[in-house]
Amino acid sequence: MNDVKNETNFQNDTILEVRNLKKYFPIEKNFFGKPIKFLKAVDNVSFKLKKGTTIGVVGESGCGKTTLGRTILKLYDADGGQVFFEGKEITKLSKRRMRKLRTSMQLIFQDPYSSLPPRMTIGNLISEAVKVHKIVPKEKVTEYVLDIMQKCGLQPHYYDRYPHEFSGGQRQRICIARALAVQPKLVICDEPVSALDVSIQAQIINLLKELQINDNLTYVFISHDLSVVKYITEEIMVMYLGNVMEHGDTDEIFINPLHPYTKALFSAVPVPDPDVKMNRIILTGDIPSPANPPLGCKFHTRCKECMNVCKFIEPEYIEALDNHFVACHLYNKEVMDNLEKYDQEYLDMMNAKEEENEK
């Protein structure tokens, strides 16, 4: 499929489309310096995102959430797949051509303490990109920045102050103001509230929702806090070791999680009702190394519903219900109807390995 056809088929209400995106980091090289072993941080990820909506990317630490966000923004070069922004493929754009799109795609960092240069005033921090990208005429920069600050809940007299004079919540508001100053259409929020107190988290989340409504912003919201994700997102994508395990509407996934990993993850969400009994699913074992993932389904080493087929065949990513996608053999009718055949294949494979080891 050529690029022209791809752009023609792009839906008008879709702002971002990711197709089979891959990002591999080399961790071992041969004598000649050629990479021979890779860490598959993002492996074959696909999704679409409509304008003005929010998708939540969730999963345990190290599952590839942050790498996915940075690869979408081309802070990392993709090793495979495509990223389409407003119908245009940006995966192979040069740095010069990508620079024109930087104002449309912004990132809010996780740590508001380390992401702000300590020697710049708040006014300079926010106005820097405004001046570089010529968002408004020079004489109107200060007025424009003060307006952005007000939108983000920052007082005008903060303009000449330095980051060390502010609390974590205020610093994150500054980070948000800096990102929004260049009038982006897509904002990737990389765990923007995880470093903040719970009471401050609510304020920042409400601010993000208010700004989204007023400016028709689109968010990719990366988080491990499912309570926050449930409140702010329309869709959820569950990741594990670089792969998408499940993807669907937020309400649907919370009510009816399909993948065993999603069920375990969501069973840990606290319910604010002392009379509700929590049916917590405890996962045994540690996450396998992404540098050496298990054969077949990457989750099978910790899955209570693991079958022999899971141990050597990677599950297909299928639409199990309407707009509800899952990568699990349990929902693949063809696999479930032929379990005996797969059991025999697995036994044959294990016997062959034993014979090889004995030799």
Image (tube, grey):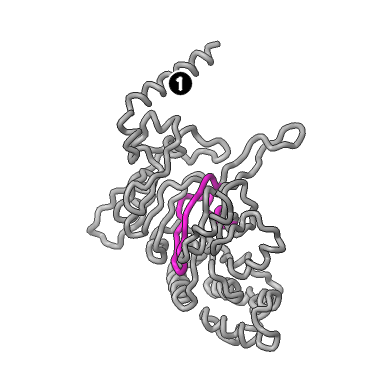
Q: Quadrant of residue 329?
A: top left
Q: Secondary structure at mark 1?
A: helix
Query: Can residue 133 be seen here?
Result: yes
Q: Position of residue 222 (x, y in %)?
A: 49, 59
Residue drawn 37% across the image and 21% down it: 344
Q: Which residue is more in the foreground, 198 or 67?
A: 67
Q: Which residue is more in the foreground, 147 or 185?
A: 185
Give the side of residue 243 with respect to residue 98, left or right.
left
Residue drawn 22% across the image and 58% down it: 275
Compared to residue 20, the image places residue 205 above or below, namely below
Q: Position of residue 308 (x, y in %)?
A: 38, 28
Compared to residue 131, the image places residue 238 above or below, namely above
Q: Quadrant of residue 318?
A: top left
Which segment is the magenta one? 42-70
* Residue on which disc 1 sits: 349
Give the side of residue 173 with respect to residue 124, left or right.
left
Residue drawn 52% across the image and 59% down it: 8
Query: Can residue 121 be seen here?
Result: no
